[in-house]
Image (tube, rainbow, N blue to C red):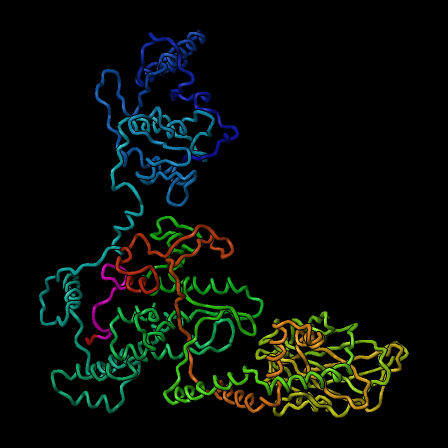
Amino acid sequence: MLSPSSHKRPGVVPSCQRGSLVPCPRLTMSNPHRPQFSTGDLTDLAETQISCFAKRTTNLLSCLIVSLVAISLWLPLPGRECQASGALGRPGEKKEKIVDFVRDIQPILKASCYACHGPGLQMGQLRLDSKQLALQGGHSGQVIIPGKSEESLLVHRILGLGDKARMPLQGEPLNRDQINRVRAWIDQGAPWPAEASLPEATIAKHWAYIKPVRPELPIVKNHSWVCNPIDTFVLARLEKEGLTPSPEANRETLIRRVSLDLIGLPPSLEEVEAFLADQSPDAYEKVVDRLLASPHYGERWARPWLDLARYADTNGYADNQRTIWKYRDWVIHALNKDMPFDEFTIEQIAGDMLPNATTDQKIATGFHRNTMVNDEGGVDLEEARWVTVVDRVGTTASVWLGSTLACTQCHNHKYDPFTQTEFYQFFAFFENADYRVGGAVPAVQEPVLELPTPEQENQRKSLREEIPKLEATLNTQTPELEKAQAQWEREEAPIRATWHVLDPIEFTSKGGASLTRLGDQSVLVTPYADKETYTVATRTDLKGITAFQLEVLPDKSLPAYGPGRSKDGNFVLTSFRVYWGTDSQGKTAKRVNLRNPHADFSQTDFPVASVLDDDPETGWAILPQVGQPHAALFQTETPLGDGSGTPLTFILEHQSQNEKAAIGRFRISGSTTESPQLAPALPEHIRIILNTQADKRTEEQKNDLSCYYRSISPLLKPARDRLFELTERLRKLPVVTTLVMQERNSWERPFTYLRVRGSFLNKGQKVYAGVPAVLHPLPESQLANRLGLAHWLVDKNNPLVLWHPRSTTDSP
């Protein structure tokens, strides 16, 4: 109703200028002897005026004078208070009429004020639906001063006094009677009953938010029909309506019903016959016990819970599979072993945070790893992570509280028991869960728990004991290695000198990838398609070229550092062709015949020679030696190039069925020696070190060069091969994994930022983990984290989580 706005609404005229009968201090007279009139006196004078016109008096001027005198006599003098019509009677009445807030004032506030100053909106930080907040005021200060209406800003604003716009801004102004009632109410001390204030308090008293208490059992007549307390309530209502319970079903129907209810399967013929033959008093109970002991019981009742947990074997956005079936099995096992519901809850919300958490308790946290996961390329990673946390908030509230807390993600709602701030306080409980960004296609990755069998664990232990010893051998520099390194440097330099890098002039991609020339004259490819063909054109002044060398180079922008673009860093080059010279249209015309291909490394069944057979089903690959440079040499059948800018075109084809198996970075060189040798494909920083004189190398360069040489030294090849064998055996162990939650170490209470309008980009105020105010507080013995939230959910004071301190299964 009140606003901090200082401008006036166009066309709004103060009441004292619109002929209103409401007194205005700016128009009071200064005659100290003028008698004070009540509104009753004014009414009599107004009637005299009307009568004067009604009788069509000829003296209109006299009537006008009478009217002006009546109004002037009614206007208050300076320093004297106006009396409200609702509080004053006719002349002769001595006692003021008491204004009732609920009857006289609250309807005015609801109709004219709550739209701008109520639970949904508080313009000027003023809220008038709460006594405490209304008396507190807003940006403009205190608006209600009990006992002093003439000093209350509320009265000034509804009268349109001062330089502020009259209230309400929209809709009709308050009439004389309404204004006088407000003034009289303030002058009487602004009494405001507690039960008429704070919608939150009213909500808190709603039966849904009150802790349930055990009611007294109703009195029934047919006691023999009652088997448990619930039957008493059912029977009481039946007797009230004059109804009787249906007769007990026949035995065939009973066993069919209970079997379908408990295990989701109809009974077998043998089970039906056994039940019919059992005439003992507890025959039905024995059937129930047998069904509860069946493993199918957990399978049957896990299904509705897994639906609540949004369980799926894919990430949800596509058909990409994820492994989380261990969580499904955990739910089944928990139901079959009669796990108490409080344990069932705590382990799923925060099993990883329990003291000395067991493997099963960690598996249970898969409840919140069932969120949909978008791991496609181009996804905003922060938004993707934020969406998963929003899902965890909404799911926790709907499953355990039976409330749609997610509705407040963007803003508050009138009469909603939860606020937007409370949504993000709840959000903060899950904000401290561990995650990282990584992968071949960068994506949000959360913890994965490995679950090896005892036999697999023994194998891993044995392998892990030998691997560190081999790594120590490969990282130790010895005099023998230093001598071999010096020899290698002397032999490598002349070979490297025989190769001349061919500078790429033009380069294109048939699959639409972007090719970029780097400073070392290599070509970097981004992005990529499943099947790619690169065309690179150059000119060279070399004469008598006898061989070409293709280097495939790692790069930090590539998956697993490359040099390929598949997710493991590998590639499959299916064809390598060279053309030279130009035809009449200026295009390269002659294909160069290549022979004697060899490489520094080829993957099993993917030899480098296969790139010359033009078969798309074969090709050169390098797994497992990814993340490091490699080179392949191709000799020409006859020398080519006349030393006058010979045009050359290289075509690299990748037609493999493997996903995105194209080279990510490469460089091409030419040699004119009679017996070309394959030069080692060197990392760029090693090439720089080798081009630096030995006596001018820094200690860091010397160490880097020694480290690199140990990775290629023939002396250490047995150790490298053994290390590769062990790591491959370790990698290929078929260990089952599952998705889990894991808390980050933090000394600060979990927090997040309120998102304005629910947008993850628009951060608002910082909020700390907390629970909705309408419910019971977080136990003082619990920290404000996921584990504390779990204990809060199953607290016996929580009216929304109904559970009994016993197992999840209870025989009828």
Q: Looking at the picture, how far across and down is residue 674, in whole percent?
A: 81, 90
Q: Looking at the picture, how far across and down is residue 136, in whole percent?
A: 34, 36
- Whether residue 54 is visible: no
Task: Determine whether 32 is above or below 650 in the image.
Answer: above
In-image side of 589 versus 268 (left or right): right
| Front residue (pair 588, 38) | 588
Residue lying furthest right: 584
Instruction: Say if the magenta span includes residue 793.
Output: no
Secondary structure mostly seen in the magenta stretch = loop
Task: Determine whether 152 is above or below 248 in the image.
Answer: above
Instruction: Say if the magenta span includes residue 803.
Output: yes
* Res 255 → quadrant: bottom left
| Front residue (pair 268, 711) | 711
What span is in magenta? 794-809
Which quadrant is home to the N terminus?
top left
Q: Residue at x 53, y 71 (%)?
A: 438
Q: Looking at the picture, how far across and down is residue 128, in whole percent?
A: 35, 38
* Res 522 → quadrant: bottom right
Q: Residue at x 60, y 83 (%)?
A: 710
| Front residue (pair 615, 286) | 615
Which quadrant is home to the C terminus?
bottom left
* Res 556 → quadrant: bottom right
